[in-house]
């Protein structure tokens, strides 16, 4: 997400960062570039105008002229205004209600609403430690009810059955009554979607809303529809008292216009981003982190959180205990760490959150990613070609063994030597891993294998 906007804005702001003095003229040129970058990202025109005016107002004031580094201050202003545009801080779900807290999901057909119900149920169960019941009030599509039943089974939450003979209001009420009997914390109600906004659809969802009085009414919208996403959100916001927005399919949206427009047009916060098909692929929306990513500054906090959620905790605990006892970090542990990085969405998911190092453009980033992916596959193949004894004690690997391992993994002897050297570097770093700050150190060690490494965290 934001790839095109990031590349364009990063280049524009790099041109102004080194300026010893900012004048109204060179600010004007930079703002013109910023305006074009936002419009190309499919940000709504009124939002672009308002954003550029606010940046200009602050930039030509005393805030920049009195600074010793006016170029850097200008970048900070752009970042602050991006944060303000998207909501400044993450807004959590408000579940402070007598159980069950009811969440109503609204949106057009094809936006990923039912999939998002499954993701949200998993999020509430695993991260908020809530018991969850899900129900489908979509009496027009039997497949939607079946899909939700399957998702509920996958994420391990309660599914309340419904069928086409029932009315949506009756289904929602019955599900809430069932949740009360079972002392369930949260009920998520999936509603019918349409291919376009129509009066009947709005009337039906308004009836359901009035009958169940949800604490959260979330609008689910496909980020790839750009400005249309913001306009659809406004139509739903006029019909329903929305409390927030979930942007889906953001991993397929290179522009990012929806994320920058929805909040400004509806006045409602973006609460979550759907980042893929998997049930765990739902991230809380942090405007400050997203602003950093847009400006090519990376998002290391989200990277660490992602690592903590994806890690095999049992293996991590065993490794920590092993290191505490003074036992070395062997090549089997090294292979485990490579697999952990795969679980975090591969290098694409990691590099997306790293700062754009050395001014790499998108093409260079893509080449670096491909090279690193190839290197990781090669490293895994080399370790798999070793005997268990060699993995536990790399000192056993003599010249003849290196030749055998290289032959077995389809690599060169020097590739085997390079891996052993990288493992020794990791071994030194892992000696410093403790329970406090262990994750940050582990991330630093693993990311040192990426092109350009990773900033200190």
Image (cartoon, helix red, strand yellow):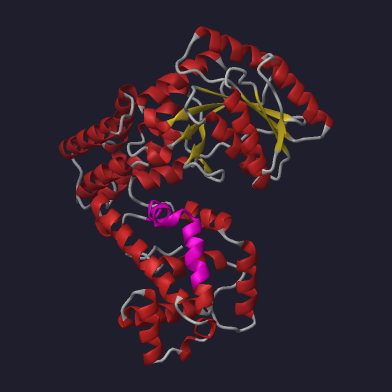
As drawn, is 45 to the left or to the right of 210? Answer: left
**Quadrant in which residue 120 is drawn:** top right
Furthest residue toward left: 25
- Any part of residue 201 in sight: yes
Identify the residue shown where x is 65% and y is 33%. 149
Q: Residue 346 colored magenta?
A: yes
Most foreground residue, 58 or 17:
17
Is residue 145 depicted above or below 420 in this figure? above
The image position of residue 94, as x and y in percent, is 65, 33
As drawn, is 229 to the left or to the right of 312? Answer: left
Is residue 219 depicted above or below 419 in this figure? above
Most foreground residue, 63 or 236:
236
Identify the residue shown where x is 40% and y is 57%. 347
The image position of residue 444, as x and y in percent, is 45, 67
The image position of residue 353, as x and y in percent, is 41, 52
- Any part of residue 217 in sight: no
| Quadrant where the image shows the N terminus | top left
Identify the residue shown where x is 53% and y is 58%. 307
Which stretch appears magenta? 335-354
Most foreground residue, 427 or 264:
427
Identify the residue shown where x is 31% and y is 45%. 75
The image position of residue 278, as x and y in percent, is 52, 44
């Amino acid at each position: 997400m934001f790839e095109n906007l990031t590349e364009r804005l990063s280049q524009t702001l790099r041109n102004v960062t080194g300026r010893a003095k900012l004048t109204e003229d060179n600010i004007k040129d930079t703002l013109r570039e910023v305006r074009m970058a936002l419009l190309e990202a499919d940000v709504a025109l009124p939002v672009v105008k308002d954003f550029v005016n606010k940046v200009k107002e602050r930039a030509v004031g005393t805030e920049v002229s009195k600074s010793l580094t006016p170029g850097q201050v200008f970048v900070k202003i752009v970042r602050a205004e991006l944060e303000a545009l998207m909501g400044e801080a993450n807004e959590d779900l408000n579940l402070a209600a007598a159980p069950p807290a009811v969440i109503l999901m609204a949106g057009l057909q094809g936006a990923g609403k039912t999939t998002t119900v499954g993701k949200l149920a998993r999020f509430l169960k695993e991260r908020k430690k809530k018991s969850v019941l899900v129900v489908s009030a979509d009496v027009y599509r039997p497949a939607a009810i079946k899909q939700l039943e399957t998702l509920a089974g996958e994420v391990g939450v309660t599914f309340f059955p419904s069928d086409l003979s029932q009315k949506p209001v009756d289904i929602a009420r019955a599900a809430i009554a069932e949740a009360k009997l079972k002392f369930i914390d949260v009920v998520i109600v999936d509603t019918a979607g349409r291919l376009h906004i129509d009066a009947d659809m709005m009337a039906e969802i308004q009836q359901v809303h009035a009958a169940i009085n949800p604490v959260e009414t979330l609008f689910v919208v496909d980020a790839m529809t750009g400005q249309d996403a913001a306009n659809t959100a406004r139509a739903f916001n006029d019909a329903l008292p929305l409390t927030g927005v979930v942007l889906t399919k953001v991993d397929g949206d290179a522009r990012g216009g929806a994320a920058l427009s929805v909040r400004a047009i509806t006045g409602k916060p973006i609460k979550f981003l759907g980042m893929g098909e998997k049930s765990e692929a739902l991230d809380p929306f942090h405007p400050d982190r997203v602003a950093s990513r847009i400006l090519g500054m990376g998002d290391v906090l989200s990277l660490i959180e992602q690592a903590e959620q994806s890690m095999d905790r049992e293996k991590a605990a065993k490794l920590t205990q092993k290191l505490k006892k003074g036992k070395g970090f062997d090549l089997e542990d090294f292979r485990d760490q490579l697999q952990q990085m795969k679980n975090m969405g591969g290098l694409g998911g990691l590099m997306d959150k790293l700062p754009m190092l050395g001014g790499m453009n998108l093409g260079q980033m893509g080449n670096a990613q491909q090279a690193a992916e190839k290197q990781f596959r090669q490293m895994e193949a080399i370790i798999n070609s070793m005997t268990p004894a060699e993995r536990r004690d790399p000192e056993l690997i003599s010249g003849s063994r290196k030749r055998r391992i290289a032959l077995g993994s389809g690599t060169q002897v020097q590739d085997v030597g390079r891996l052993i050297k990288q493992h020794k570097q990791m071994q030194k770093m892992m000696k410093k891993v403790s329970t406090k700050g262990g994750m940050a150190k582990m991330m630093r060690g693993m990311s040192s294998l990426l092109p350009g490494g990773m900033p200190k965290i």
